[in-house]
Every structure is written in C-alpha cells, then in structure tokens.
Amino acid sequence: MKMKKQVFAEYGAPLTEISGEPPKPQGSEVLVRVGHCGVCHSDLHLHEGHFDLGGGRKLELAGGRPLPFALGHEIEGEIEAAGQDAKDVKIGRRIVVYPWIGCGECALCKRGDEHLCLKPRQIGIQVDGGYATHVMVPHPRYLLDYDPIPAALAGTYMCSGVTAYSSIEKLGPAAEESPILIIGLGGVGMMGFSFLRARSKFAPVVVDIDPKKREHALANGAAAAFDPNDPATRKGLMAASNGGFAGAVDFVGSDKTATLGYGALAKGGKLVVVGLIGGEMHLSVPTLPLKGVSIIGNYVGSLAEAKAMLDLVRKGKVAPIPVSTRPLSEAQQALDDLKAGKTVGRAVLVP
C-alpha cells in the first residue's frame, strides 16, 4: 500500500498530505503500520517551532528535523516488515512504540535515561512520526505489547501515560501518604489523576479552568475541584490540604499554574512541573530553604518506566481517560481543537 503522511513544510503552516512508497527496513529496523496515533499538546509547540520561555523570550525548535515533517509520537500499530538484524520480530504483532530514543552511546543512554539524551532520535520529534500510515522504528526493543488495553487508547500511554507515571513517581512516598494537588486535566493530567488514584488511598485535589473537566474529576473520585481564576481558590486549597500539600503536579506548565502549585506546598513539599505551556516563574529565593521545598522538572519517562507503567495498566488498575478518534486527514483540525481547548482527554488519529 502507498504510505501517506500529514506533514508541514514550514513551521506554523497547515498540515497537508503527501504520499509515496513505504521505506524498507534495514539492519535492526522495524516498519510499523500505524493503527492509531494520539495528538499531544507538544505537537502544537513543534508545529509552531518554539516554546514560550516568558519575558518575550522563545526556545526555538525550528531545525533539527527534516521538512516536510510528520508529527506524532503516541503510536499504536502492527509490525509490517523488519530488517535482517531485527531478532524475534513477529509480522502482524500489534504493539505500541516507545518513541523517546537516544543515541545509545552517551552516559544518559547507558544508565537507562535515553529520553534525556543530548543527541536524540525521538520519533515524531526529530524523525518522522505517526501522523502517517507507516513509521520506522530503529530497534525491536522499542516495541511493547499492550493487550488487553484498547487499541485506540494504547498509544497514548507512550507519552501522556509514561509522562504522568514518571511525574507521580517523582513525588516519592508523598504520593501515598497524603492528598496530592493535580493542576491541569488535559490528556496528561487525566492520566496523572488515574495513576494517583491507583496508587494512593487519598483522593487528589484538582485545579482546572474547564468546569466539565472539574466535574469529570469529581465524578471519578477527586476530593475537591477548583477554578484557578476564582479569587477564593488559594484559600480553598489551603483548607482542603490542612495548610499545604506534600506534593503538587503541574500538568499545565505556565507561570500562573507553577506559581499556584508552589504556593500550595507545605514545608518539605515537592512541586513537579510537567506541562510546557510556557512563561516565567518568579519566586523569592529564601523561601526555598525556609520551606525546604523542591521544584522538579519531568520530561516524559524512561523505557523501564514505560514497561512498568504498561504492566500496571494491563492489570486493570488504572482508569482509562476519554479518547475520541478521527481520520488522519483531520490532523490539522485535531491540532486546532486542542489549541482551542476543545479536546477532552485525547484525540486519536486513525489512518
């Protein structure tokens, strides 16, 4: 079959379809026919070509990838072909793709943190991704079984899932010893909410600007839900936490949300910042040692964390997030809806 991709030829330009022959895998490469691909908020930043650092500054993302380029890193699909050095590969096997691939040679890669590699080869980030009918994976070790997770949901665990899982893991024992504050209930935030519910007997407290998302969280076990634009929210958070949270996870990553999370911490608390909306956080330096708090950044998660996370999900201990499917041809509309805040859970493209 012909290979089709939804690509952009210039940063910020609308996605368009191109087609051609699928590539032939060489060596240890594996060609995957894409079944589903999630639309992630980071796709918006990559499409626009920058992150907002606040204060009028930008982190440029233009360059580092060939144009035209296909986004998409939350990939589920079927093994279609493999190179001669790809061992124990079964054609037709359905898998999810771990996309956070490094150089394999540096100290970070060798200790198992290739998602932090300084010379990455991440699928949908530096090399063409899953907004396509086919995607090339450099080695079978990045192909993970997901059954009995529904196929439309499975790929989302390779970004929003592993990111949320790793974020909750960074809270350490605090995640199980007291209520945790979750800021932002997009696709990743809902995943984080689900992993926290599976791990702790304490119901999370949530913050989101969307009343429908707050209602969804309350219906699924949140202890309380707050609107960040409500002037009474800060007092409400202090009351809900008896004076401060031992842990907070900011799945939005803006100046306002990070400041809100930091201000809601108790002494010794941890703030994990996950989202990439952008901005610049201002805080008084002496409050860091005086409160004994930690601010931790989290970027997706390791291959080992992805496997552990999938094991947990496959055992049925994690509530699924809402997903809605739409054809690959609607990739641009899916991005537009996500940017406009119209997406609940995850939109998933189906070639």
Image: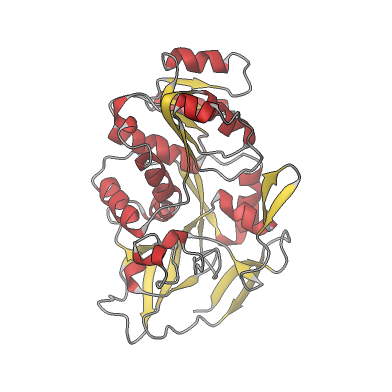
Which residue lies most toward the right here? 56
Q: Is residue 20 visible?
A: yes
Q: Residue at x 27, y 46 (%)?
A: 312
Position of residue 77 in the picture relative to residue 252 (left or right) = left
Work out whether 159 lies above or below 26.
above
Residue at horizontal 53 percent and vertical 79 percent from the top:
2
Question: How many callouts does the rendering have?
Answer: 0
The image quarter containing residue 292 is top left
* Colour style of the rendered protein structure: secondary structure
Q: Residue 122 placed where, x, y %?
A: 49, 65
Q: Which residue is drawn at 30% across and 56% down?
A: 307
Image side of residue 310 versus residue 269, left or right = left
The image position of residue 7, as x and y in percent, is 64, 67
Quarter of the rendering containing residue 173: top left
Question: Can residue 75 be seen in the rendering of this structure?
Answer: no
Q: Where is residue 138 in the image (x, y as percent from the top left)?
A: 41, 75
In the displayed structure, would residue 226 be above or below residue 42? above
**Horizontal side, residue 161 vs residue 57: left or right:** left
Where does residue 222 sit, x and y in percent of width and height?
Answer: 40, 24
193, 220: nearer the viewer: 193
Front-most of residues 318 and 171 = 171
Task: Determine whether 120 is above or below 348 in the image.
Answer: below
Residue 140 vertical placement versus 99 (above, below): below
Q: Which of 71 and 138 is in front in this view?
A: 138
Residue 89 shown left or right of residue 245 in the figure: left
